[in-house]
Image: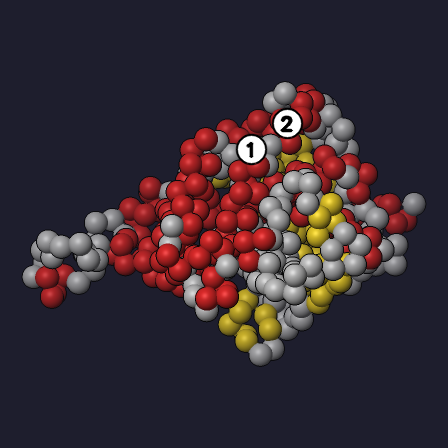
Amino acid sequence: MPSIGIVSPQTMHFAEPLQLQSGASLRDYMLMYETYGTLNEDKSNAVLVCHALNASHHVAGYYADNPKNVGWWDNMVGPGKPLDTDKFFVIGINNLGSCFGSTGPMHINPETGKQYGAAFPVVTVEDWVAAQARLADQLGIQQFAAVMGGSLGGMQALAWSIMYPDRLRHCLVIASTPKLSAQNIAFNDVARTAILTDPDYHGGDFYEHSAVPKNGLKVARMIGHITYLSDDDMAEKFGRKLRDIASSGGDYKFGFGIDFEIESYLRYQGDKFAEYFDANTYLLITKALDYFDPARKFDGDLTKTLAATRAKFFLASFTTDWRFSPERSREIVQALLANRREVTYAEIDAPHGHDAFLLEDARYMNMVRAYYEQVWKETNKEQAA
């Protein structure tokens, strides 16, 4: 299906300080966002899409000056697509602390007149949701037809259902989790350590030194990328293929360079990531992942945590996703059912690991499409009433 076409990012400024969970606050901050489709008269067809770690507000479409820069969920959002912009008004918001337009470490701290750098405060999933709610207020949207996200975006969608239960009718949580496992926190810490120990990091103030901790970012991305793929997917794509069989005579090079195709692929991904992503942003976002644990306030009881929710829920997981495994989605489903919430759950047998939520899988896309068709029918009934 065709893309939504040319889109344009917008910015919204907020002068009033945003109180953060850490006790710090942000004032004079900006949020970058994009919208697709048309908001109906009673503003009942709005859908918020929350982004994952290295994504942004650019959910769908492309830019006039850069047609190759296609939105990260363009296969999901657009005319005739599962989240149909001929029916829904879709909003993508770039999170605070990002490096894609919203106020983050690269921006000027109004208190000092210098770039925030390491002084940018730690932000949480709940802080992002609070900022998103403020933007919705400014757009006059008091209730979303749905809030949707995958991975870290799914955490935000879940947080919306807990923090603002009356402000969304449906909550779509895809390939996500109610909290990170110890293993996941460990992966994030190793990735952060790669950045923190890069000599070019300069304690987070590398901007002043005209430096970029590329080696740290590269290793961090390589570590992360391994966790996004399944063993089966890696085996099918790369196996133990040698990168340059001809020059090596069909044998190993017997050194510490690149022998295998998988090594070449990971280093390419790392190099590419280090060219466009900000190191401080990576630290902030992975720490937000670690801190997310809404059940912590309820002694770990997820059923009590979700007791105040009012939305209807759609959850999807993927069998080979070992980073946010199906078991974690089932925890959420069970807690919701214990609260007698309406829940649709899909567990997709897909080979692509965690990245499956971004890819074109007919079963997955059809499930999301069918769910949004029901959301649309409900929206129309409410309008008629």
Q: Which residue is mark 1?
A: 179
Task: State if disc 2 and disc 1 touch (CB < 8 Å).
Answer: yes
196 or 279: which is nearer to us? 196
Q: Is residue 13 left or right of residue 124?
A: right
In this rendering, the answer to whether 306 lies above or below 203 is above
Amino acid type shown at disc 1:
Lys
Taking the spot 56% from the left edge, 33% from the top edge, the residue there is 179
Q: Secondary structure at mark 1?
A: loop
Q: Give the quadrant of the N terminus.
A: bottom right
In this rendering, the answer to whether 342 lies above or below 263 is above
So how many labels did they put on this image?
2
272 or 146: which is nearer to us? 272
Outermost residue to the bottom: 65
Taking the spot 60% from the left edge, 32% from the top edge, the residue there is 293
358 or 165: which is nearer to us? 165
32 or 4: which is nearer to us? 32
Q: Which residue is mark 2?
A: 295
Q: Give the quadrant of the C terminus.
A: top right
Amino acid type shown at disc 2:
Ala
Mark 2: few/some/many CA within 10 Å (<14, 14-19, 20+): some
x, y (%) of residue 316?
56, 39
State the separation of the CA atoms marked 1 and 2: 8 Å
Q: Earlier in the sequence, mark 1 or mark 2?
A: 1
Mark yes or no: residue 76 visible.
no
Mark yes or no: residue 336 visible.
yes
x, y (%) of residue 16?
80, 54
